[in-house]
Image (cartoon, rainbow, N blue to C red):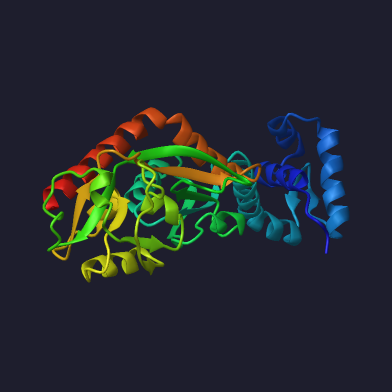
């Protein structure tokens, strides 16, 4: 089977449309002898005659007409393929897999809306990654980008901060501190805090600012496990305002902690291993930082207000 040359097919399409070598040559901005030579070349490659003489003009053979019937669709498809290749190469077309940790759902939705508005040809997929070692989803190439909470083992990863929000204390609804509007970390000295399976010292605030070590409660391997333990009154937890706002309910009350550093969410990716499409998403996030930071700050304030009002 002959390999079809797109340039020769375009020449043939012009000849078929004009039914005249001279007019087709003018249309293609080449000389008549050069066009005739290219048509003969196409016939040689296919092994059939495509054009025949009719008086002083030309017409298509049966094979030529059969080719002309399909050439427009072939050329259109080739143009679409080439456009897709170019758009993929410059990041305006392609698939990007976005992972996000628990509590970053709203932020992931915000990013998906931004990409849909500014880069509508990208195919964005999103999935929640595990609470334990979420950065592994990037290193294992399960996602291209991921919304993670520091502290992050940044070996092999690059990050950009997209959100800062308060950390809050979660109590069983009948706990004496559940009705407070705000707490200081020292007030939690005697409270057993859930022992998370990931970032355990960070979420327990261990050591505390005064150097003391918190009491450890039962271990939790997921947000759902953590909230179930708190609801059962077995321990309190320290979590983010956004997670607290995602799980409102009468069994658990959340109170902002005023004197510890806020928690952050970073967009992370594999260093030196960004597809053009993923690179454009990163550029959108970094380049649109001011407007997105405003929305993130507003979201954090809303989450904090919701936490306080539910206490």
Q: Quadrant of residue 250?
A: bottom left
Report the number of discs.
Answer: 0
Q: x, y percentage for residue 308?
A: 15, 47
Q: Quadrant of residue 29?
A: top right
Of the pair 249 and 58, the residue shown nearer to us: 249
For the point 88% across and 54% down, which residue is it?
Answer: 44
For the point 28% across and 45% down, which residue is it?
Answer: 185
Q: x, y percentage for residue 242?
A: 28, 50
Of the pair 123 and 296, the residue shown nearer to us: 296
**In this rendering, is residue 236 above or below 14?**
below
For the point 83% across and 58% down, which residue is it?
Answer: 46
**In this rendering, is residue 277 above or below 28?**
below
Q: x, y percentage for residue 91?
A: 57, 41
Of the pair 40 and 193, the residue shown nearer to us: 193
In the image: residue 213, left or right of residue 168: right
For the point 42% across and 55% down, which residue is it?
Answer: 101
In the image: residue 9, left or right of residue 170: right
**In this rendering, is residue 6 above or below 47?**
above
Of the pair 73 and 193, the residue shown nearer to us: 193
Quadrant into which the N terminus falls: bottom right
């Amino acid at each position: 089977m002959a390999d079809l040359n797109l340039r020769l097919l375009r020449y043939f399409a012009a000849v078929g449309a004009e039914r005249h070598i001279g007019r087709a040559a003018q249309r293609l901005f080449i000389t008549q002898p050069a066009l005739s030579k290219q048509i003969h070349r196409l016939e040689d490659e296919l092994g059939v005659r495509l054009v025949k003489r009719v008086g002083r003009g030309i017409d298509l053979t049966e094979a030529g007409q059969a080719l002309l019937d399909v050439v427009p669709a072939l050329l259109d498809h080739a143009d679409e393929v080439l456009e897709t290749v170019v758009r993929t190469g410059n990041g305006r077309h392609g698939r990007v897999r976005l992972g996000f940790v628990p509590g970053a759902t709203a932020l992931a939705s915000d990013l998906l809306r931004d990409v849909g508005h500014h880069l509508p040809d990208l195919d964005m997929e999103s999935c929640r990654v595990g609470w334990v070692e979420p950065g592994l989803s990037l290193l294992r190439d399960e996602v291209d980008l991921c919304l993670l909470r520091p502290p992050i083992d940044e070996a092999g990863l690059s990050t950009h901060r997209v959100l800062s929000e308060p950390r809050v204390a979660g109590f069983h609804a009948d706990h004496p501190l559940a009705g407070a509007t705000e707490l200081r970390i020292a007030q939690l000295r005697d409270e057993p805090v859930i022992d998370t399976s990931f970032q355990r010292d960070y979420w327990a605030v261990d050591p505390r600012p005064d150097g003391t070590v918190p009491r450890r409660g039962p271990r939790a391997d997921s947000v759902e496990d953590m909230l179930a333990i708190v609801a059962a009154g077995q321990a309190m937890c320290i979590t983010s305002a956004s997670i607290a706002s995602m799980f409102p309910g009468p069994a658990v009350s959340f109170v902002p902690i005023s004197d510890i550093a806020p928690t952050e969410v970073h967009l992370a990716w594999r260093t030196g291993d960004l597809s053009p499409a993923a690179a454009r998403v990163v550029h959108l996030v970094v380049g649109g930082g001011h407007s997105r930071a405003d929305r993130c700050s507003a979201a954090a304030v809303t989450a904090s207000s919701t936490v306080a009002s539910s206490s």
